[in-house]
Image (cartoon, rainbow, N blue to C red):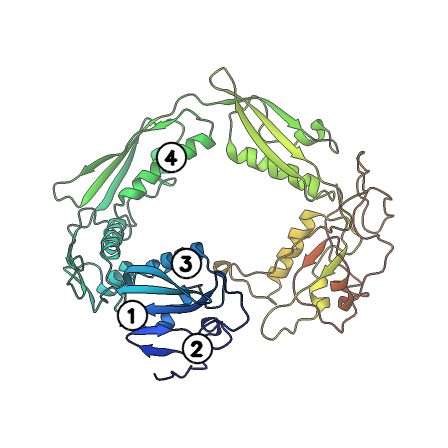
Amino acid sequence: MAAVRIDPRTPARVWLTAYVVLVILGGSVVFSQAPPGTPPQDQIVELRIRGNHRVPAEKIIPHIRTRAGRPYDPDAIEKDVRRLYQTRKFVKVNALTQDVEGGKIVIFELLERPLIEYVKVTGNEKIRKKTLLKEIGLKTGDGMDPYAVEEGRRKLIDYYHSKGFSKVFIEIAEGDQPNDRGVVYVINEGPKQRVLWTEFIGNTISDDAHLRTVIKSKPGFLWIFKGEVDRKQIDEDVNRLTDYYHSLGFFNVRVGRPILDFNDEQDWLTLRFVIDEGPRYKVRSVRLVGNKIFSTEEITQEFKLKAGKYFNRAEMTADAAMMTDLYGGEGYIFTKVEPDIRLGETPGELDLVYSIKESERYRVGKIMPEIKGEYPHTKISTVLNRLSLRPGDIVDTRELRASERRLKASGLFRVDPAMNIAPRINVVKSESDAEGVETAERPQRTAPREGPRRPGGYRGQSPDEPAARPESMPTLPPDAVIRGQSPDPGLDTSGWSPTPPARAEQP
């Protein structure tokens, strides 16, 4: 019996017991018995792994949660078996138990799969082998799994279809037999098909040129770039056309299965969509439910979608956004507006109901900039000078957006839309004032910043309280936290920006 030295670089989660001694004996790995003092009932005193010849034990152990010294749990062992199967490195996994003095011995018997020695594609002419091998997802050293090999063939077919090769044929030459050492795909690409033209039949509300902007299956630029035939994308274009007509009030529209007309060489396609528009719905009435702070007449006077007009989803969305801004501009920043379309009994008529869930009114509590980056050097005052709100002001969502735009346009911070990186202002309501605040009546409109404060009915920090220093901010519960970047612990923000940026007057 020879002791095996444990590499200190081995991950710590592999060696979870107090001490581990590996013994190589007849192709099995034996873990030491549980420490003394554990109850003998239903305890695992030893864990063994047998049958692994090519897969080392350090790659098997992370998939097993069963350990010596732990209570015996058949469900946990069953999960270990499933995890070992999911590695696709074993054809068969058996979990055996043996009763001994002091508990049980758990034995995992493994039958390894043959390993893939090579992955090849042949017959491809229009697409590079490197691209195809990346799409397959198999690599040398993986377990030979016929299901994974077939899945790789399906991925190749889908990829060729997305590139316009709808008649591609792919065969598995090696990899689906027990004695195969590698995986080989034989590809017959067929002709590459492109969209020559797209036509629409039955459309009256929009012409063909506009409908081509709605779908993605259309001729490419100069019939050279893009424009490949993708059957899956054509089916999705039916849904895009249906959604477009719904947005204009054609709720009974039907878009038939597209007609595919290929030329004799099968490389150019004329695509035809047949559309039955049906009746266009008009708005019979517009109602508001739940509004108490603002009257219905005050809200609806600026509506774009009113009774008597044809339904238009873009106008409905704009009206909902206008109501949200109306409440947000007066401090009710957590108000939710949800439109509900109710089709009438008469075809061509509908009722539009906006459900409004009003929130309470909030003031700015503390402003906590967070400056991130490897070497943050921007001063806190530089950030605060670009904000048009101060502690004690009523929170205005329009001013928040304007402040965020100024931070982005300052050039001081990284703005990368592709990576979703940009300065942001997050508003977090405090839980300390979650109860005991009543706003049953609508307060008067907010006065300009220089004027007197309106008493009562506001949630958040009192305007008379002094602004807290940045080092004390984390210890106090914020009522509304505007998060930008990391504060400088030694900087006093009580006297920042004597001349704040100008902002539009409140209505």
Task: Residue 61 in the image: state x and y as whole percent.
Answer: 40, 69
Residue shown at the point (35%, 73%) measured from the top left: 29
Q: Residues within 10 Å of mark 2 (few under 14, many from 20)?
A: few
**Type of residue at label 3?**
Ile
**Type of residue at label 1?**
Asn
Separation of residues labelled 2 and 3 (CA atoms):
24 Å
**Residue at the disc numbered 2:** 10
Separation of residues labelled 1 and 4 (CA atoms):
56 Å
Q: Is residue 481 left or right of residue 259?
A: right
For marks 1 and 4 on the same chain, the one whose residue lies earlier in the sequence: 1
Q: Residues within 10 Å of mark 4 (few under 14, many from 20)?
A: many
Q: Is residue 502 left or right of residue 157?
A: right
Q: Is residue 211 above or below residue 499?
A: above
- Regarding mark 3 in the picture, which secondary structure is present there? helix
Q: Is residue 301 visible?
A: no
**Residue at the disc numbered 1:** 52
Quick check: marks 2 and 4 in contact, CB under 8 Å? Answer: no
For marks 1 and 2 on the same chain, the one whose residue lies earlier in the sequence: 2
Give the mark toward the camera: 1 or 4.
1
